[in-house]
Image: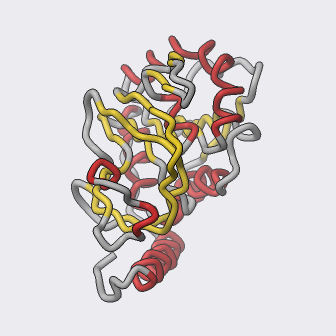
Amino acid sequence: MTALRILHLYPHELGINGDAGNVLALRRRLEWRGIEAEVLLCGTGDPLPVDVDLVHIGSGPASARDAVLPDALRHRDALAAWADDGVPMIGIGAGFHLLSRSIETRDGSRRAALDVLPVVIRDRERRAVGEVLAEPSGGHRMAGYLNHGASVMRDDGVPLATLDHRSRSSAIHDDADRYEGVRIGSRIGTHLHGPILPMNPFIADELLAGALARRGETLPDRDERTVAADEHARLSRAAIARRLGAAGVEV
């Protein structure tokens, strides 16, 4: 069995919200199950590897996003081909924006992005800030932290989750803000930090299962270390629920 190859795109340029923890979670959840993982780092000016099994792009301020966008466009065809081939991808914050069809900045200009996710990102003055609970289309309730100033116009796909009404008012301004991220096939875009994958490890396992399925393999059952990590994550989500006045809500 060859190592599962995880591409961490722009690890230094986009990584201000514990995004390295997302990649570490993916790696550990493989290694604990006896599957070798190889993390490939690709920054500005670097060539993409020939083939990968999973892609992660992390978060950063709009200035960092805009700075790496021209470099990212070099990889547009390769990333589109991987997406068409079913390679799981997750973009978080600025990484989500890079994977969109286009980005509309506050000065009214529009910049083409990677066109991997069927959304348009619109920068805005107001920010969504605060801890949130979120209800995905199926499975466990999610939790984390939002801190972004963007609207998401979805052309296709479905929201990754719906924010719970008890989430702080600073994180939800109107009905449109109640829908978080986007999911289409094995591709996910989200503004949820925490970092998201250690906090919501069922999303990590979904990505890993998809990556292994492309190779004709299955994700083994959780071992005791994975179960322990998942319980810590559940307690973290429960703590957020309590702070939001939702003590007792199943997370």
Residue appearing at x 44%, y 16% in the figure: 81
Does 87 sit above or below residue 141? above
Query: Residue 37: horizontal and vertical position, in percent?
Result: 61, 45
Residue 28 sits in which quadrant? bottom right
Looking at the image, which residue sits at the far left? 138
Residue appearing at x 51%, y 60% in the figure: 129
Residue 201 sits in which quadrant? bottom left
Residue 90 in view: yes
Residue 54 in view: no
Residue appearing at x 64%, y 33% in the figure: 65
Query: Residue 238: horizontal and vertical position, in percent?
Result: 42, 81
Q: Is residue 63 left or right of residue 86?
A: right
Does 228 sit above or below residue 85? below
Along the viewing direction, whichever of 108 and 2 lies nearer the viewer: 108
Does 39 sit above or below residue 214? below
Residue appearing at x 38%, y 22% in the figure: 85
Along the viewing direction, whichever of 7 and 189 lies nearer the viewer: 189
Query: Residue 130: horizontal and vertical position, in percent?
Result: 50, 66
Looking at the image, which residue sits at the far bottom? 248
Query: Residue 153: horizontal and vertical position, in percent?
Result: 34, 33
Q: Is residue 147 left or right of residue 84?
A: right
